[in-house]
Amino acid sequence: EDQVTQSPEALRLQEGESSSLNCSYTVSGLRGLFWYRQDPGKGPEFLFTLYSAGEEKEKERLKATLTKKESFLHITAPKPEDSATYLCAVQARSTGNQFYFGTGTSLTVIP
Amino acid sequence: EPEVTQTPSHQVTQMGQEVILRCVPISNHLYFYWYRQILGQKVEFLVSFYNNEISEKSEIFDDQFSVERPDGSNFTLKIRSTKLEDSAMYFCASSAEAGQFGETQYFGPGTRLLVL
């Protein structure tokens, strides 16, 4: 069965303290891995799509990387406005277009 | 920037009542989806829709659920006889295509459904 696991569940950082969030996956044939940001009571906001091992994408203070088993979302010098839940989702060749989401990492950045 | 919109933002209903959740996907997208998120849990796939028919559905999407694209812009999710456990945030999403490689799905702001 396809699985997506995110860690840690929650992370508190001081402003400027860099860290990484992890998304490990076991799927039959990865079509894509997607990172989203979700603010409380809102819909997932698209951040990155990664397709193959070794791929990296960057946007402002965020950088996403992908290996054959996991993806990391690196946050460099975070600011309080980066506080949100970060969701990882995968799409597998064996299961069509549906996304499998992890439970997310709740990030709090303290000023 | 184009975005997915959903109405209503909140819906309160009595158990056994029918509800219709509405979505306007991004205008040039061809694939439409419904997901739900029970409070504190992960986002779960319900159904995908392409070319006016369901292309995939999950075990959650049983006979009480239906989807429709009544016109060129709206995409609806109907729950025929709501249950307490249907209380959740429902998200609509759309993607431009769904080829060999994963195609990004863009999500709406959600409809919070509360069944009493």
Image (cartoon, coloured by chain):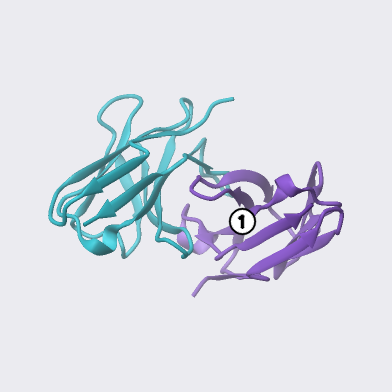
Chain colours: A purple, B cyan
Which chain is disc 1 placed on? Answer: A
Percent coordinates x, y for residue A59 in the rendering? 78, 42
Residue extending furthest toward the front: A111
Which amino acid type is shown beneath numbered disc 1?
Answer: Thr
B53 or A36: which is nearer to us? A36
Q: Helix or strand or loop: what does disc 1 sit on? A: strand
Q: Quadrant of residue A18?
A: bottom right
Relative placement, left or right, of A106 versus A12 is: left
Q: Quadrant of residue A17?
A: bottom right
Q: Is residue B101 visible?
A: no
Residue indicated by mark 1: A85
Circle 1 packing at 10 Å, graded few (<14), some (14-19), many (20+), is: many
Q: Residue at x 73, y 64 (%)?
A: A12
Seen in the picture, residue A72 relative to B112 is either above or below; the reply is: below
Q: Is residue B5 visible?
A: yes
Percent coordinates x, y for residue B96 in the rendering? 52, 35
Percent coordinates x, y for residue A73 in the rendering? 75, 58
Q: How many numbered discs, if any?
A: 1
Seen in the picture, residue A110 relative to B18 is either above or below; the reply is: below
Seen in the picture, residue B29 relative to B50 is either above or below; the reply is: above
Relative placement, left or right, of B27 versus A11 is: left
Percent coordinates x, y for residue B101 in the rendering? 60, 49
Q: Quadrant of residue B110?
A: top left
Relative placement, left or right, of A106 versus B9 is: right
Relative placement, left or right, of B29 versus A76 is: left
Q: Residue at x 49, y 75 (%)?
A: A1
